[in-house]
Image (spheres, rainbow, N blue to C red):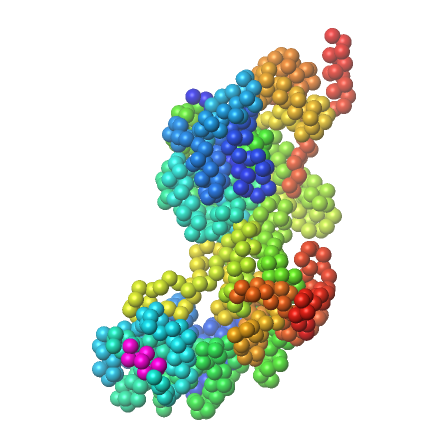
Amino acid sequence: MKFYADLHIHSHYSRATAKNLDLENLYLWAQLKGIQVVGTGDCIHPVWLKELEDKLEPAEEGMFKLKAKYAKPMDARVPPACRGQVRFMLTVEISNIYKRLDKVRKVHNLIWFPSFDAAKKVQAKLNAIGNIKSDGRPILGLDSRDLLEITLEADPMNLFVPAHIWTPWFSALGSMGGFDRMEDCFADLTGHIYAVETGLSSDPLMNWRLKQLDPFILVSNSDAHSPAKLGREANLFDTEFSYRGIYNALKDPRDKGLVATLEFFPEEGKYHYDGHRNCHVRWHPKETIEHNYLCAQCGKEVTVGVMARVEQLADRPEGQKSPRWRPYKSLITLPGLIGEAKDVGPASKAVDETFQRMLSSIGNEFYILCDASIDQIKQAAGDVIAEGIARMRAGKVEIAAGYDGEFGTIKIFSDKERKAIDQQLALF
Amino acid sequence: MERPRDLNDAQWQAVTYDGGHLLIVAGPGTGKTHTLIRRIAAAIPSLKPSEKILAVTFTNKAAGQMRDRLMALGLPQRQAYIGTLHAFCLQLLREYWEQTALPKDFKVASPEDIPDFKKDVLERISLVKSTKLAITPDEEYKAYQRALRQKGLIDFDDILREALDLLEDEAVAGKVRAQYPRIFIDEYQDINVVQNALLKALAGPTGIVTAIGDPHQSIYGFRGCEVKLFHRFAEDFPNAKILYLNENYRSSPNLLTASMQVIGKQADKDFELVARMYEEGKLFIHQAATDRAEADYIAGQVEKMVGGMDMLSARGARRSFGDIAILYRLNSQRHVITQALDHLGIPYQASAKPPKPPAYSDEAALGQFEEVLDYSVEKVSLLTLHAAKGLEFPVVFISGCEEGLLPLDLEGMKSDPREERRLFYVGMTRARECLYLSWAGRRQIFGKTVFHGPSPFLADIEEELKAYEAARASRKKFKKPEPVDGQMKLF
């Protein structure tokens, strides 16, 4: 069956996350977004793990569902048009900080588990090594390669996925804390990695430019720190609805179970361009090179973003595909789109009202963004939003690229256009 | 022969000196182990096939490292015995047990094997055994020795004393001396009279002894070690040459200057360290209101310099956890620090005694007093100042730089202020680039609240070298704390 999965999220036990990032709200928001499989996040945190055991019950192999007594109170808040089944899969992100080849490396890695037993085995190992109680995303002074070894030893069905591999400070290939080659990071065990996560600031097109990534299938997840951020990126599978289905789709190069990914426009990500946020210096990589990587304001080395980093490591011309390529769609979140159409912030009340109305009358967010007819959207939300979605689907958006931790800003309409579309409406 | 590039002139002189006994006075970071190993390596080729060098280290760990380094130089292990004095003596006792008063299958006891005696009694007996050559036994001592021997046990200190007795047998001593004509001993500043006597007995009239150490880092007086034995080397081993290593390759020049200002009051006049690192380091002084606030400050600084916690804090953060050590005078200071680190999710390892070894194996018995750290994973190291000896870190925090703790002067815990100064010096000289000296005006210790001013040692560092770090980013000079309950002592 076809289903969307978002397998990198956090719980409220991780630092800097929303208080309501709990199973009930994940269950609610997964339906609003159109996600059928959502990661639990943080699943080796002892308190969160206990909560998972208490509130979830086994469903399909390796999948878990929220017990009825917890799900029921949330159901009223899900518009009938959005209702769907939600399954949880056990996932965690680990922050590995360690020295390798004389440099401090900071690499985030995801581990996905087929069972509570498998998660507990890794939990026990990591508990002996470091502190897993203070943060849902524990920080360990453990080499990524050794974490991979622990993961594989605990259960061969565990999946290990390097997280947002391009983010400058915390990733396997990042410009500031990463390596130039996956083999430098994971050494002899690199072959046991089947998938890598592209992160918000890169899309598959960019990743295809590295031959060293050919063995891996590209996955996309939200890394949500609040329920509403779920599904910023996601994976569309068409395979057996089980952990094994997902496992095979990632592991086996002949398996076509992973159909496509939903992506951010990479420019919208926080680290697409280079620069210094505090100095308000935002540079295209060409400008960075012209300035010899030194900030024009403070003179210190700028944070080199994902675009430049990909260019640095690329060994294949732009536009060519990698052997395990999948199609993808670049999307803007629906609240972001509504905000742009109305020329107000995405978190404003006006946006939320329209958002809820569209969910009620059309269906979940993924359906609206990807599949609903423009006419249907027009009827429910008006011409400007419908036009915005049409333009987004056609890739006709302008984005001031994100840099050094600052999200990019999207522009679909000029003020003039907004008015013009409204006036057209008034004419009819 | 030409001096190799990895040895400076003084080191080269120490490696090649062949005029008899040699004492190498080697300050912190001056390449002590490197020089000693090269001197050992230089001695091995001149041995006869029946001969070995004897290299005595302070810990099993140090012995292991020395073996590894000699192996790396491609030297035959069979021509060297490398180990602690206890390990070596135990081997002698096993080999020559017929000449001892011990049963053939005697075992080495750990303190836990002697449940009938209280800890303080055991400590007192141990101190007597390591500080007196001739013991006039009292009833307690006799009862203890009887209890041991009834079970066929000897204790850790007995290993050395029995070996010393054994070497009075001239036939045995002759054989041992013939086999080990060259003796090398590390950490000579921390030797006691029994070890000293053993060394003399092992050397006899013909053996050649090389000792290396730093009297400014002598910190085990409370265990019966005597720094005066270091200064007496030339009398114990006639015609000994004394050489100095004083080029420091570890610490930033300003940190080294500060360290020397602390030790300066009792420093050997001939001996001043010269910085061979050129980049200036950082020396911060931080005053906290309470031990808890001090711990939060330290944990916060660690978080900042590792920058692992979020994307923005990562900027400019270039340390990893293994770069950092937090030192303290007493183990009981540790708890509040680990709480603060736990709160921020910072991984740490505290040096702790390993679990009780399986009883009666020589290996276990010999390792029983050593602390074990886990190096497979990077963590912030939490160590007592004593345990930090011999280690180095880019960043070092010394917490509890206050009266009462440095020098140690708490109810029921007195110390030798000169040794405490050396201990503080040992702590300071662990730092390569960054040194944080912090203190708390109020502290919970052994269930009591104590109020103290800063350690007098801090005042010995000139103001120029110190940067005062306030709890929140802004930098300002600390104010003298307000007296609390009229108990506050100010310096």
Q: Which residues are magenta?
A: B140-147
Which residue is rendered at x = 27% and y = 73% of the image?
Answer: B107
Q: Where residue A236 sits in the image (x, y, percent)?
A: 49, 26
Which residue is rendered at x = 56% and y = 23% of the image?
Answer: A77
In which quadrant of the rendered view does residue B119 lie?
bottom left
In which quadrant of the rendered view does residue B279 lie?
bottom right
Quadrant assignment for the N terminus of chain A: top left
Q: Is residue A89 above or below residue B486?
A: above
Residue B342 visible (yes or no): yes
Q: Nearer the viewer, residue A54 or A393?
A: A54
Quadrant assignment for the C terminus of chain A: top right
In which quadrant of the rendered view does residue A17 lie?
top right
Q: Nearer the viewer, residue A333 or B139?
A: B139
Which residue is rendered at x = 66% and y = 39% of the image?
Answer: A406
In the image, farthest residue toward the top: A428
Q: Is residue B43 above or below residue B309?
A: below
Q: Main secondary structure of the magenta part?
A: helix
Please state if B359 lies on the left or on the right of A122 as rendered: left
Please state if A106 lies on the left or on the right of B86 as rendered: right
Q: Where residue A143 sits in the image (x, y, percent)?
A: 47, 50
Which residue is rendered at x = 62% and y = 79% of the image?
Answer: B264
**Residue A151: in magenta span:** no
Q: Where residue B8 sits in the image (x, y, percent)?
A: 53, 75
Q: Nearer the viewer, residue A263 or B100?
A: B100
Q: Where residue B391 sits in the image (x, y, percent)?
A: 50, 67
Residue A259 visible (yes or no): no
